[in-house]
Image: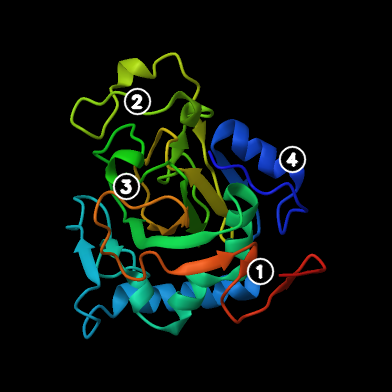
Amino acid sequence: MTAAASQELLFLTPQQKQFFDDNGYLNIKSFYSPHELDEMRRQFHELVSQTENRPKNMSYAFMPQAEGYPVDPYNPLNVVGMMDHVLANEYWFDHFTDPRVVAVMVDLFGPNIDFHNGKIRNKPPGFVCTQGWHQDWPYERHTSPDLAAVITYIEETGFEVGATEVIPGSHRKGEWPTYNGVCVADDLVKDEKPVVMAASGGDIAIIHVMVLHRAGHNFTHTSRHAIINEYKTAETIDQWNNRCAFAGLPLARSRKPLMPRVHCRQGRRI
């Protein structure tokens, strides 16, 4: 992993950075304020309920209504996934370029950060995850594994409602063997101790590209939604022909966010 510059951290505490370095993931509670979360939920509902007349290079995936489960009116079309939601409008552009998020990535990976891709992963009522343990690395190869996903949660997400599980420290073991090119067999992780990444609305989680993780099922009558934006260092070079919207967009150079917005948080100007 690329070490961040030995300078004062922009956003994280030293303990948070050390936790990520050791475990390969990090939860940050209440990253977004209640007011910000309210607006995010409004914008997200519009995103999943008004799917027509969107840019053609945005793609939606829909899930059939699961037997015995109602459709959640917040996600009335059962949108289960989306790519390149960052093209929808200026709100979602601002979301992935938020200098606070960029500052977190600078703290974790170093002074020069680029965008990688943006997607939505929803779990409508009755959702069953068919993908097992995996690393994101086989999907997103670069010259070095200096990438991470930032997951934004817009409602409470726990073990029984689709929370992601991670295996702490698994990123330190390099690339794990797979049985189908991407998934890791359960018997290889039987001695590990997974952690459920329970979250509340407004929290974010950062997951290193090499960390073993898997999504959960949702057997409740309420959808769970996650906004996933991925970031990389400028120095690591794409090896999989990334054609996602804004791929490679420079977001920080020499520890300075390049987007024009300025945020104040915890008394710090970023």
Disc 2 marks which residue? 176
Say if residue 247 shows up in the picture. yes
Residue beneath the point at 27% across and 58% down: 242
Q: Secondary structure at mark 4?
A: helix
Q: Which label lies toward us, 3 or 1?
A: 3
First reached walking from the N terminus: tag 4 or tag 3: 4
Q: Secondary structure at mark 2?
A: loop
Q: Are marks 1 and 4 in contact (CB under 8 Å)?
A: no
Q: Is residue 159 above or below residue 125?
A: above
First reached walking from the N terminus: tag 1 or tag 4: 4
- The Cα–Cα distance between marks 1 and 4, rounded to whole angstroms, is 22 Å
Disc 4 marks which residue? 15
Say if residue 28 shows up in the picture. no
Picture coordinates of residue 25 (x, y %)? 55, 40
Disc 1 marks which residue? 33
First reached walking from the N terminus: tag 4 or tag 2: 4
Q: Are marks 1 and 2 in contact (CB under 8 Å)?
A: no
Picture coordinates of residue 147 (x, y %)? 45, 48
- The Cα–Cα distance between marks 4 and 3, rounded to whole angstroms, is 28 Å
* Amino acid at the residue labelled 2: Trp
* Amino acid at the residue labelled 4: Gln
Q: Is residue 59 above or below residue 196?
A: below
- The Cα–Cα distance between marks 3 and 1, rounded to whole angstroms, is 32 Å
State the residue in front, 169 or 189: 169
Residue beneath the point at 22% across and 86% down: 53
- The Cα–Cα distance between marks 3 and 2, rounded to whole angstroms, is 14 Å
* Amino acid at the residue labelled 3: Glu
| The residue positioned farthest toward the right in the image shown | 267
Q: Secondary structure at mark 3?
A: loop
